[in-house]
Amino acid sequence: MGRGKIVIQKIDNSTSRQVTFSKRRKGLIKKAKELSILCDAEVGLVIFSSTSKLYEFASTSMKAVIERYNCLKEEHEQLLNPPSELKFWRREAAVLRQQLQSLQENHRQLMGEQLYGLSVKDLQNLENQLEMSLRGVRLKKEQMLTDEIQELTQKGSLIQKENLELCKKINLIHQENMELYGKVYGTRDANEAGGNAFVQYGLNNGEVSQLPINLRLSQPNQKL
């Protein structure tokens, strides 16, 4: 048989009421914990029993939850009440104007302007602040230059490697041309004509040597 529907009203029997309170309190705390984990919600739960016992659960801390609740409740009430909302935005505007004025004054002092009224200690603090800022700028510039030098060095090494590969390919082509010339004219003629068939280049510092020039094959004489 299915479980009968429970009437939601106060339980008269104190023992049954205490048992029900204990079971449902544990279930409620479990649900609150699951809600905070599954939905990334900030949850705060406070329970007072009929015997004035306190039970609580907070996903972060109860103090933080209560402070956040009071803050948001105050803002919500101010937005619902037009006069309070106007006062709120006027107060925010005044705070922002004060912050802007302070930033502008600090900027002028960093530029060396309006230094009157500052004590020696204030000037020393301003000097220390400028030195720290300058040190940071220099470190950033040195780091950028170092990175650029490393990048150029890597590019130079890559270009040098490619140059060596091209030299090897050209030397291989030169050797193949010499072999072809020897097969056509003979080994002796190839040695004698080597200087005429190829232009000699120095091989200093990985430069290319003995590039081939135009090769012309002679036609055999036809017998009559």
Image (cartoon, grey):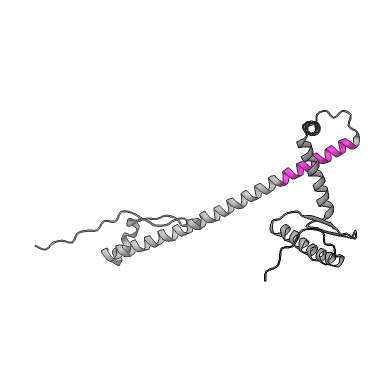
Give the camera-side residue of 90 and 160: 90
Compared with residue 181, is residue 130 higher up or lower down, i.e. above or below?
Answer: above
Q: Give coordinates of residue 113: x percent, y percent.
A: 80, 29
Residue 47 in sight in this render: yes
Compared with residue 137, is residue 22 higher up or lower down, i.e. above or below?
Answer: below
Instruction: Please state, as top left, top right, bottom left or bottom right, where the N terminus lies in the image.
Output: bottom right
Q: Is residue 126 magenta?
A: yes
Residue at (72%, 43%) from the top-left corner? Answer: 137
Q: Could you tell me how many numbered marks the image carries?
A: 0
Q: Give coordinates of residue 118: x percent, y percent.
A: 88, 32
**Which residue extends farthest bottom?**
1
Q: Give coordinates of residue 205: x percent, y percent.
A: 51, 56
Residue numbers of the magenta segment:
121-139
Residue at (28%, 66%) from the top-left corner? Answer: 183
Residue 104 in sight in this render: no
Residue at (84%, 37%) from the top-left corner? Answer: 126
1 displayed left or right of 214: right
Q: Quadrant of residue 167?
A: bottom left
Residue at (81%, 51%) from the top-left corner? Answer: 65
Q: Quadrant of residue 197?
A: bottom left
Compared with residue 59, is residue 88 higher up or lower down, i.e. above or below?
Answer: above
Give the camera-side residue of 211 and 135: 135
Q: Give coordinates of residue 80: x percent, y percent.
A: 76, 36
